[in-house]
Every structure is written in structure tokens, then in C-alpha cells.
Image (tube, rainbow, N blue to C red):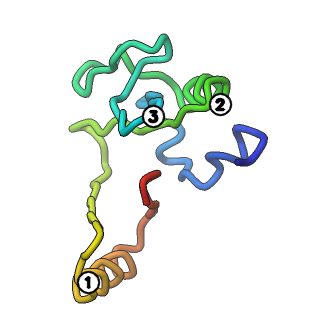
Amino acid sequence: MPDSTAERWAHIPSELRERPQWCISPGLDGDKAPRSLDGRLASSTNPSTWSSFDAACATAAERGWHVGFMLHETDPFACIDLDVKDGTPDAYLQRHQRIIAESDSYTELSRFG
């Protein structure tokens, strides 16, 4: 894992980083629940439980946790979740690749691959 916060999450677009819509998550034993910086569960509808990108990254780095962006109805962003599980047919994987290629977007793999 990279040493600095800047290296760990440097690939995240500035358009996302500048919004105070960040939470942290332990990511242990499948626990992907978003948390406020104090470790309590964050709300997907209550921005007061979110934080800045820099604060989330610093806290996540201290704990060895992950950061996550909280989508909001006022965002100019869209999210496409393309799930791949064991046994996903090749035709689906090829379709996923076409969607990614044609979207001209920021794309990342989940921490579970």
C-alpha cells in the first residue's frame, strides 16, 4: 500500500475530491458500511455525517480503512455499478468492458475486485 494519503487516493478526480461528501469504512469481514470520522455509521441522506476528502483520507490512513464518496441527488454525477462474480459469463464481461470504454469516465474496481 502506498505510504502517503496523496498516493493512496491520488487517482480520484478533483471534481469528487472537492466535495465534502466523504466517509470512511473499515472494509473488514465485508463491512462496507459508511462511517463518519468518529467511527459511527454515516447517513446516506444526512450530509452532517460526511466530511471533506482530506479529512476522510487522513482518518482512513490512520486506521488502515478506506474512503468512499456519498452520492447526493444534487450531484452532477452518475454511478454505474457493474457487478462481476465468480462464473460471470464472458459475454457479460465483454459488455462491461464496452460500457467502461464508451462512458469516458472515472472507473475503479471495488476493493473486493
Which numbered disc flags the more N-terminal residue, 1 or 2?
A: 2
Q: Which mark is residue 61?
A: 2
Amino acid at circle 1 = Arg
Classify mark 2: residues with Cα within 10 Å, few (<14), some (14-19) or many (20+).
some
Label 3 sits on residue: 28
Q: Which mark is residue 95?
A: 1
Rendering coords of residue 55 (x, y %): 59, 23
Classify mark 1: residues with Cα within 10 Å, few (<14), some (14-19) or many (20+).
few
Quarter of the image where one finds residue 81: bottom left
The reply to whether dot 3 and dot 2 touch (C-beta < 8 Å) is: no
Rendering coords of residue 102 (x, y %): 34, 81
Which numbered disc flags the more N-terminal residue, 3 or 2?
A: 3
Whether residue 78 is visible? yes
Q: Residue at x 52, y 26 (%)?
A: 52
Q: Whole-Å distance between the Cαs marked 1 and 2?
A: 35 Å
* Secondary structure found at label 2: helix
3 or 2: mark nearer the eye:
3
Amino acid at circle 3 = Leu
